[in-house]
Image (tube, helix red, strand yellow):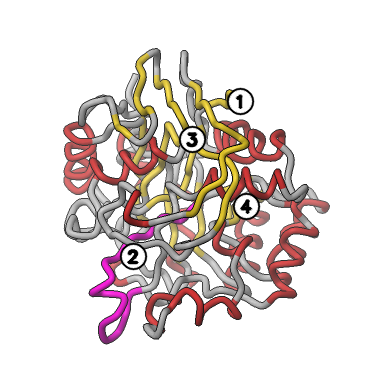
Amino acid sequence: MRLPGLIDPHVHFREPGQTHKEDWNTGTSAALAGGVTMVLAMPNTKPPIFDAATLDLALGAAKEKARCDYAQFLGAGPGNAEWGQREALPLRAAGLKMYLDSTFGELRLNDMSLWMPHFERFPKGRPIVLHSESRTMAAGILFAALYDRPVHIAHISLKEEVLLIKAAKEKGIKVTCEVSPHHLFLTEDDIPAISHGHPGRGEVRPRLATKEDVEALWANLNVIDCFATDHAPHTLTEKDGENPPPGFPGVETLLPLLLTAVDDGRLTMDDIVLRSVTNPRKIFALPEQPETWVEVDENAQYEIKASEMHSRCGWTPFEGWQVKGRVRRVVLRGREAFKDGNILVEPGYGRNVREK
């Protein structure tokens, strides 16, 4: 079966600053192995991506190492909202990521007065993505209405969130949203199985939710615009240590999990293409990728094993899961980029889709 190349609009490739977890080379290799031919990288790196110098740092690494196509988000910080004076900078980025909760260091915006200049000044031709949960998500939707500009809500996980977004869309508010596979396929009850005696392996933000929340996401799938992995790799040493960082790897397991859901009758192939190709392209104003496709063996049954994956972090919360549907071959812009477990394009083959 042939599919278009998938777009993952939410990945953390840890470069600059934490390349022991992942870098543009290993992250985009994992993407290709998962049938993903374009990624949008988040800005909460070390240092965070919030000005020309740090954007150049990230894009320079990507130009050297990325094997699939990409764009890089800028981060909204408390002191970098003068976008109107530097409009060329936002146009080089995938969009603006705003962290509306208080746990993200230099990029936290836990005072709503800090949100206002970003909504006022960031160019309207580029998307604003919100990390917001529950009540801060409601506040973000209010800002979308007040400023009459689209917002995209990252990784929704709760029943109350999907129902609020549904109500906002029915009122004509310009809001879209994404869901991550771990919030569709895992609940808080799965944490012991994920953890293997190490509770940190179950740590993710937003947290894994209740069965009722997960069922509400599936029941309101028509409200959800995109599938996005929030690929957030950390090493097992970090996950098993004190103060384990939250996050799961996911870019390589996205398509097998979705194809298995198709086999189970929970999704259709059209659902996958709509939420992993058509809608991300529209929401984030992304170009088409010519001569690009993914070949999958929809009948292949196998067990997910981190030891066979390309991510540097070396583990997956879906270890041991039986799935049906394997990526066999990926063609990216006319070149065979992946075949039967092997990455065939060199580092640097990926293109920055914001460059003309």
| Residue 47 location, quadrant | bottom left
In the rendered structure, which amino acid carries the disc numbered 3?
Answer: Val
Label of residue 327 in the image: 3
Locate residue 138, reporting x and y percent: 65, 68
What secondary structure is marked by label 1?
loop
Asked if residue 89 can be seen in this view, the reply is: yes
Badge 1 is on which residue? 1
What secondary structure is marked by label 4?
strand
What secondary structure is marked by label 3?
strand
- For marks 4 and 1, the one nearer the N-term is 1
In this rendering, position of residue 276 left or right of residue 67: right
In this rendering, position of residue 342 left or right of residue 154: left
Q: Is residue 159 above or below residue 37?
A: below
- For marks 1 and 3, the one nearer the N-term is 1
Q: Is residue 2 above or below residue 95?
A: above
Badge 4 is on which residue? 177
- For marks 3 and 2, the one nearer the N-term is 2
Q: Is residue 347 above or below residue 169?
A: above
Magenta stretch bounds = 229-245
In the rendered structure, which amino acid carries the disc numbered 1?
Answer: Met
Residue density around tag 3, few if under 14, some if 14–19, many if 20 or more, within 10 Å:
many
In the rendered structure, which amino acid carries the disc numbered 4?
Answer: Cys
Residue density around tag 1, few if under 14, some if 14–19, many if 20 or more, within 10 Å:
few
